[in-house]
Image (cartoon, rainbow, N blue to C red):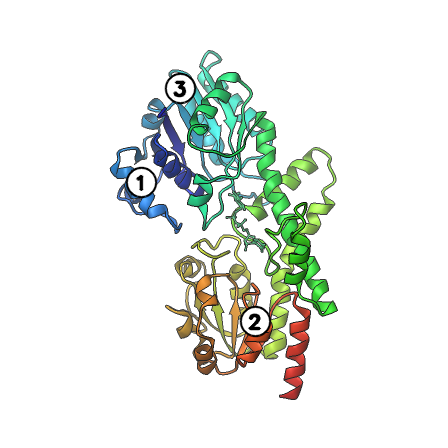
Amino acid sequence: MSMRLGFFGTGYAGLVTSVGLAEVGHTVTAIDKDPDIVARLSDGTPTIHEPGLPELLIANLEAGRLRFTTQAEDAVSMSDIIFLCVGTPSRADGRADLSQVEEVARTIAPLLDDYKLIVEKSTVPARTAYWIDWTIRRLAGSECEFDVASNPEFLREGSAVRDFLQPDRIIIGADTERARSLLLDLYEPSFHCPIVMTSVTTAELIKHVANTFLASKISFINMVSDLCEELGVDVATVAKGIGLDPRIGSHFLHAGLGFGGSCLPKDLSALMKVAEDHGVDVSLLKEVERINTTRVDRLLAKVERALWVMRNKVIAVLGVAFKADTDDVRGAPSLAVVPRLHRAGAVLRVYDPAAVRNLERLYPPDDRLTYMESALEAVRDAHALVILTDWDEFRSLDFDRVRSLMRTPIIVDGRNLFEPAEMQATGFEYYSLGRGEATFRTERQRVRI
Ligand code: UGA
């Protein structure tokens, strides 16, 4: 059964979810306040870099199942279910800023004519649905008919379309039978994965806890990575050795520069605040956060160890996105590494396959900071190459050519993309994170030189 859906917000979650639900046959109206965004999307041009999205966007616009508007009235009156997909960024104190969520609740309230199901897709702290309900009832009167449910999204940037169309689970948090059955009718016919039915508050909490657990896993392996370096073993082998135990699992055990992006850091700090507000001890999570913030220091110490004096050293920086396959630089290590190397006096040549323009807006070019059009251009005459993002394009570079272009063949790899022995055999002095044996070999090689 095709349903009529309204979406407030066309960011990552909003755009991918609205396009995805149109793709499985529903009629979708998505609202954004920004007329330029609406014009671009209506034209079939995605506002984000996401594999598979352009094709689905165009197909569903052409099929007439998807449209974009700035007019909230249209979307509310023409929808059975209204999804809230606006941003919930961090406030200065680490709590989630819910002002956009409140604004949508205030916008929807006077437009409610008959029953609507209002669904939180944005990641919000537990009990946010209560406040949405309270806000709408205050403004629309107690006789207006609606429910507020929670249906968190677990898609990852870079694989968001696939994650949405082939989810590993769907969480439906609903406190009334009407809300529960509407959301089941929406998902059950098209998605064949476990569907977990919970209360609204439980669903809200599941999303925060999922991201916090993923963040904890990464900080854990990064702590182990530091120990591996001291003991002369490779963290990737330790991760493989523990990850084959299904109770541990092999995903999210990749050591390196830590977790960035617009979700894991924000949701970790928001959950800590929720817990603190309820008197729950969060020292474990504080340590997860602290370990994460020290990753960039560790990388920069290696750059300094490799180059000694940084002033006027030419450094090629490959990768500014917070991870591969996205143009997103929010929470990316590059936001810390680029200004710190710049302050140290280095001459930076920066390249990323998709995200350069987004970094350029934050750090405009100058006589010691240039944004390049290719990796090979960036490494020309460089004293060192620093890798910050795990793009496949970097894995498949011709490293004989890279070596011949560089002034000194030094690589500091924050993502552990290569086998240390292979890079050394190609003639590089190669530094990575948590691979003790390799570092020791590099040290010995240097002594011989
Ligand atoms: C994350 C979650 O994985 C999604 O399930 C969730 O829906 C999303 O947040 C959200 O809340 O909207 P995302 O931020 O796109 O997705 O990125 P991840 O793939 O989770 O990566 C986060 C960070 O961890 C990246 O900086 C990545 O480089 C880093 N990472 C990931 C590691 O350092 N090691 C790993 O083993 C895995």
Q: Are marks 2 and 1 in contact (CB under 8 Å)?
A: no
Mark 2: which amino acid?
A: Val
- Residue 366 position, x and y percent, is 42, 70
Q: Quadrant of residue 231?
A: bottom right
Viewer-proximal residue among 241 and 134: 241
- Residue 439 position, x and y percent, is 65, 74
Q: Tag 3, which secondary structure?
A: loop
Residue that appears at 44% across and 74% down = 398
Residue 235 is left or right of residue 405, and the answer is: right
User: In terms of sequence position, does the residue under pointer 2 or pointer 3 come before the other?
Assistant: 3
Q: Which residue is mark 3?
A: 112
Q: How packed is label 3: few (under 14 Cα within 10 Å), some, or many (20 or more)?
A: some
Inter-mark Cα distance, 2 to 1:
42 Å
Specify whether tag 3 is near ligand 1 (CB below 8 Å). Answer: no
Q: Are marks 3 and 1 in contact (CB under 8 Å)?
A: no
Q: Tag 1, which secondary structure?
A: helix
Residue 412, numbered label: 2
Mark 1: which amino acid?
A: Val
Number of the front mark, 2 or 3: 2
Q: How packed is label 1: few (under 14 Cα within 10 Å), some, or many (20 or more)?
A: many
The image quadrant where one finds the C terminus is bottom right
- Residue 252 position, x and y percent, is 60, 52
User: Quick check: 392 above or below 264?
Assistant: below
Residue 38, numbered label: 1
Mark 3: which amino acid?
A: Leu
- Residue 156 position, x and y percent, is 49, 46
Residue that appears at 39% across and 51% down = 49
